[in-house]
Image (tube, helix red, strand yellow):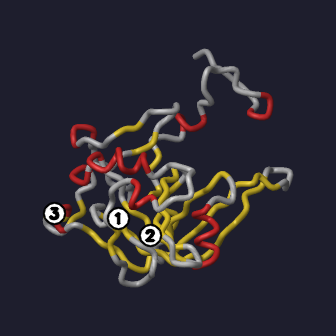
Amino acid sequence: MTEHFYRPADGHRLPHDPFNSIVAPRPIGWIGTLDAQGRRNLAPYSFFNALNYIPPLVGFSSNGWKGTVANVDATREFTWNLATRSLAEQMNATSTTEDIDEFEAAGLEAGASLEVKAPRVAAAPVTFECRVTQIIELQTAAGDATGSWFTVGEVVGVHIDEDLLVDGIYDTARAQPILRAGGPTAYFGIDTSNRFDMRRPT
């Protein structure tokens, strides 16, 4: 095996930074918030994942103190909405940096949450209602600030389209989630043909 080795601090020497492609595909954190004045915000974050089982925790990282981070800092809550193939174009439209109501701009209906005030994407087949547990500025190994902010939220309410429950089991592929890949434009879906099963050793 011939290796391409690089030290990130010195550059990767490739046409596009491979880091985002290697840690992939990445689930999309489609985050709904309100600001302190009650104005809506909706934005996708490709650095997102589940972090803990009990209690359920999810987290997303923002490169910079953006509107979403300011909102979760002020209100201590947010929603995560499942981005699916049928909602891909609208999800992409909410990645704008303009100071607008992304729900309205993307033609998305906002649904009411039950445990928090932050809005949901009504068309999303799954939504987590979350209360913020931590907002952490990420650091380098040397302890220097990166300017990126990691928000952790405890899931306090879960909305699931019952069509995705097959014999009571959530069907991941049936939801047609989309996942971020490397490069400026690449996304992936999930297909049942790619499924395989393994049991943990006892």
Q: Name the residue under label 3.
A: 163
Element marked by disc 3:
helix
Residue placed at 27% from the left, 43% from the top?
195
Q: How crowded is mark 2: few (under 14 residues within 10 Å), some or many (20 or more)?
A: many
The CA span between labels 3 and 1 is 17 Å
Q: Mark 1 points at which residue?
A: 121
The CA span between labels 2 and 3 is 21 Å
Quick check: marks 3 and 1 in contact, CB under 8 Å?
A: no
Residue placed at 30% from the left, 66% from the top?
122
Which circle marks residue 79 in the picture?
A: 2
Element marked by disc 1:
strand
**162 sits left or right of 114 in the view:** left
Residue placed at 42% from the left, 74% from the top?
129
| Amino acid type, callout 2 | Thr
Element marked by disc 2:
strand
- Counting residues from the start of the chain, the first of labels 3 and 1 encountered is 1
Give the x, y percent position of residue 192. Answer: 22, 43
Identify the residue at the far bottom of this view.
115
Say which quadrant the N terminus sits in: top right
